[in-house]
Image: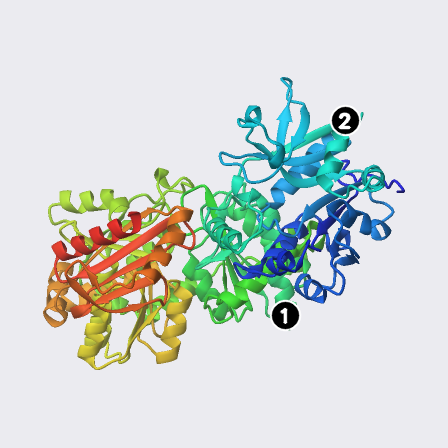
């Protein structure tokens, strides 16, 4: 074979041969067995495609086997093994189609779909670095499969590969096995195959043995995840492999592979791993490409950033990409709340709004939220397009224009939009009414982005506001900036120690799209309670008619209140994009979620903690009642339900077993409580009598299982939560 120049970091040119001919009809049929949402052979090739491009993959097939070609795709090279003489003969069949510039051959199998791309890369890399003549994959197994065993001398050198039928009692302690993927120079490998074939031997394992007795160096790369070694030789093997594939889907992924993946509220990743400026630029290029294809590039894009590490640099890098694609940019100066960017997209008639934020995640995270022209979050089909294109782009595919050049050319406009955003809120909120109320509040922006906008609004209302945790601190005081009860302990103590000084405590999360409230007694007001209050107020005091939309984890008391008003109520999946979509479908007056996100009809199509705080101030001013008094009034209408939630670590095994148990053992009762229905809108929700319910939902962004319950009494809620906890950990 001709020798080509090295590529990348002195890497030799590699071609792969994947053996898919099978020894008989039964083995070939197993290659087409369903595995996850793919097949055995397709998954094996899919893994190989992550290591080498399609033009470097040769598939050896049986005569007249068109099915495998249809399954694997026409972009691969196919060659026929005319007779099923053995695996060595199958490799030899590919001789005529191996590219001339190939310097090393990787040989693997179509019935090993569990081999990770990283293991194949590791094998190739070790072969190259060790300048080996022959390399093979091995693994140590507590219960070795019927594979050849690896014998080594005291120095660790491989001395033999012993087949299972040849094992003796002295070999019983050998647990290292030959996994069956090999690397060698093509000329050398084919020479060994031809030599053995002349003596009637056509098995690759014998080829491997022949290298052990030669002068060519033999090295191994060890697999530590023994699940990879599971071959597909029986239907039982397919079932075992299916469990392994599913389990892998739920293992928390490191972002070191630089893959961009959108969740329910945008793309988030750990800074320095998945979240890099390189990844950000690729994502912005994909969005710019979409804008150009759709013919909306002339409308431009609004870009802002929060107070996290790299947010300002990221906003500027994003601006350079859009400017480089001839897309006008409104680059908002300083840090801004997410709702301001949500508002800014329709306000400026831009094609997109982009905010650099990781919301309430811990300080070592950052991310991106993208908004459509109307300010709504794109649905899954749209974000799938962005992420898939972004992940396919190379560094050289990204087009940028230097920030200073873009500024000079007028492609980037850095006019702030804080005033228009505040003005728009004050057109909806009755700020003049609040002016005469003499309200006094304590505010915790959690080191986030609300202090300028919310501070200005409260000042315009003549609300006496005392802010804490308002400094610019990217570490957020060492906690995740989420306005839940535990993280608002300082605010609660401040209210309690004030001796009646404060009428209310307000809080917003790191990017200001969520709200937290503490009442005049220093007690945390849950998001469920706040949604009830706002829905009641909009209907009774503002004269707003319409239904309510909530996600699956939010209180059913909203349904009761809607029924009381004769209005519609709608349940949706977790993710505020689903809430706003549901609001538009039924023209709802309110949409919200139990984690602190809400919006009202006529305002932006996204969560807004700043607007929500202003609305709560109006509610107290107009009614003249305290928060605790208002909630008691509402409970006289709806009755009481008590909510509890808990998050527990979710192992991959749990993600397999819990759905399986729910399916195989249909539930009729939780303890003594009769089950009315079970729904799977998002997770598994168990409906009981009298609006009681329990929800099991695996998080899409964290390795946790979330448990939610709502019941007639606190004791019953705790009982339901305890039952869920026991069920999932049994």
* Residue 379 visible, this angle: yes
Residue at 48% over, 42% down: 309
Q: Position of residue 119 (x, y in %)?
A: 62, 40
Q: Count residues near mark 2 (Cα–Cα under 10 Å), then give few for <14, some for 14-19, many for 20+.
A: few
Q: Position of residue 414 (x, y in %)?
A: 55, 57
Q: Residue 665 carries which label?
A: none
Q: Is mark 2 on a helix, strand or loop?
A: loop
Q: Count residues near mark 1 (Cα–Cα under 10 Å), then give few for <14, some for 14-19, many for 20+.
A: few
Specify whether 282 is left or right of 470: right
Of label 1 and label 2, which has the lower sequence position?
Answer: 2
Q: What element carries label 1?
A: helix
Does 518 sit above or below residue 224?
A: below
Specify whether 33 is left or right of 374: right
The furthest residue to the top: 154
The residue carrying mark 2 is 213
| Closer to the camera in the image, 183 or 316 | 183
Residue at 51% over, 70% down: 373
Q: Position of residue 294 (x, y in %)?
A: 62, 72
Rounded to the nearest angstrom, the CA distance separating label 1 from label 2 is 69 Å
Give the tally of numbered discs. Answer: 2
* Residue 433 visible, this angle: no
Does 4 sit above or below residue 418?
A: above
The residue carrying mark 1 is 298
Q: Position of residue 387 (x, y in %)?
A: 57, 58
User: Which corner quadrant of the image does residue 146 belong to?
Assistant: top right
Figure colour scheme: rainbow
């Amino acid at each position: 074979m001709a020798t080509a120049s090295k590529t990348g970091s002195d890497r030799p040119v590699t071609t792969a041969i994947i053996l898919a001919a099978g020894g008989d009809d039964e083995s070939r049929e197993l290659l087409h067995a369903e595995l996850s949402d793919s097949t055995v052979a397709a998954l094996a090739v899919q893994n190989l495609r992550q290591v080498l491009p399609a033009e470097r993959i040769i598939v050896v097939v049986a005569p007249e086997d068109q099915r495998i070609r249809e399954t694997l795709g026409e972009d691969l090279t196919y060659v026929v093994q005319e007779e099923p003489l053995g695996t060595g003969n199958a490799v030899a069949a590919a001789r005529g189609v191996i590219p001339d510039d190939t310097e090393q051959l990787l040989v693997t199998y179509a019935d090993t779909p569990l081999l990770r791309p990283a293991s194949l890369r590791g094998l190739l890399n070790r072969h190259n670095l060790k300048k080996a003549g022959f390399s093979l994959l091995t693994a140590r197994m507590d219960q070795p499969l019927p594979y050849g065993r690896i014998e080594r001398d005291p120095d660790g050198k491989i001395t033999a590969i012993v087949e299972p039928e040849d094992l003796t009692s002295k070999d019983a302690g050998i647990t290292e096995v030959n996994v069956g993927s090999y690397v060698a120079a093509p000329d050398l490998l084919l020479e060994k195959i031809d030599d053995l074939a002349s003596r009637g031997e056509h098995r690759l394992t014998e080829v491997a043995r022949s290298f052990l007795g030669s002068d060519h160096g033999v090295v191994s790369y060890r697999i530590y995840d023994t699940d990879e070694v599971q071959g597909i030789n029986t239907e039982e093997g397919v079932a075992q492999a299916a469990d392994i594939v599913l389990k892998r889907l739920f293992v928390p992924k490191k972002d070191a592979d630089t893959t961009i993946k959108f969740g329910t509220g945008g793309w988030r990743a750990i800074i320095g791993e998945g979240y890099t400026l390189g990844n950000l630029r690729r994502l912005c290029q994909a969005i710019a490409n979409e804008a150009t294809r759709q013919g909306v590039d002339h409308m431009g894009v609004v870009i802002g950033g929060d107070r996290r590490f790299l947010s300002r640099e990221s906003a500027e890098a994003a601006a350079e990409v859009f400017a480089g694609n001839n897309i006008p940019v409104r680059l908002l100066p300083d840090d801004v709340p997410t709702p301001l960017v949500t508002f800014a997209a329709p306000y400026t008639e831009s094609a997109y709004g982009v905010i650099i934020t990781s919301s309430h995640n811990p300080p070592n995270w950052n991310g991106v939220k993208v908004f459509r022209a109307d300010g709504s979050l794109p649905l899954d089909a749209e974000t799938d397009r962005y992420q898939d294109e972004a992940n396919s782009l190379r560094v050289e595919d990204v087009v940028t224009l230097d920030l200073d050049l873009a500024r000079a050319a007028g492609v980037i406009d850095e006019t702030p939009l804080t005033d228009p955003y505040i003005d728009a809120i004050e057109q909806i909120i009755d700020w003049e009414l609040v002016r005469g109320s003499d309200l006094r509040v304590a505010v915790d922006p959690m080191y986030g982005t609300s202090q300028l906008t919310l501070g200005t609004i409260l000042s315009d209302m003549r609300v006496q506001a005392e802010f804490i945790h308002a400094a610019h601190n990217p570490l957020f005081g060492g906690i995740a900036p989420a306005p839940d009860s535990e993280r608002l302990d300082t605010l609660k103590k401040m209210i309690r120690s004030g001796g009646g000084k404060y009428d209310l405590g307000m809080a917003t999360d790191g990017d200001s799209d969520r709200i937290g409230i503490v009442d005049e007694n220093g007690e945390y007001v849950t998001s469920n309670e706040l949604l009830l209050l706002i829905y009641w107020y909009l209907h009774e005091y503002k004269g707003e008619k319409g239904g309510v939309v909530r996600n699956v984890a939010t209180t059913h008391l909203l349904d009761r209140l809607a029924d009381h008003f004769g209005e519609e109520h709608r349940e949706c999946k977790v993710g505020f994009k689903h809430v706003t979509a549901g609001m538009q479908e039924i023209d709802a007056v309110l949409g919200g979620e139990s984690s602190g996100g809400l919006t009202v009809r006529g305002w932006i199509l996204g969560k807004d903690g700043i607007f929500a705080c202003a609305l709560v101030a109006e509610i107290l001013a107009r009614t003249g009642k305290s928060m605790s008094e208002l909630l008691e009034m509402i409970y006289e209408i709806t009755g009481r339900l008590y909510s509890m939630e808990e998050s527990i670590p979710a192992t991959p095994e749990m993600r397999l077993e819990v759905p399986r148990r729910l399916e195989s053992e249909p539930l009729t009762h939780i303890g003594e409580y009769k089950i009315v229905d079970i729904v799977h809108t998002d997770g598994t929700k168990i409906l009981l009598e009298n609006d009681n319910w329990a929800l099991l939902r695996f998080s899409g962004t964290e390795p946790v299982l979330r448990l939610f319950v709502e019941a007639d009494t606190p004791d019953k809620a705790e009982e339901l939560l305890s039952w869920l906890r026991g069920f999932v950990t049994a």
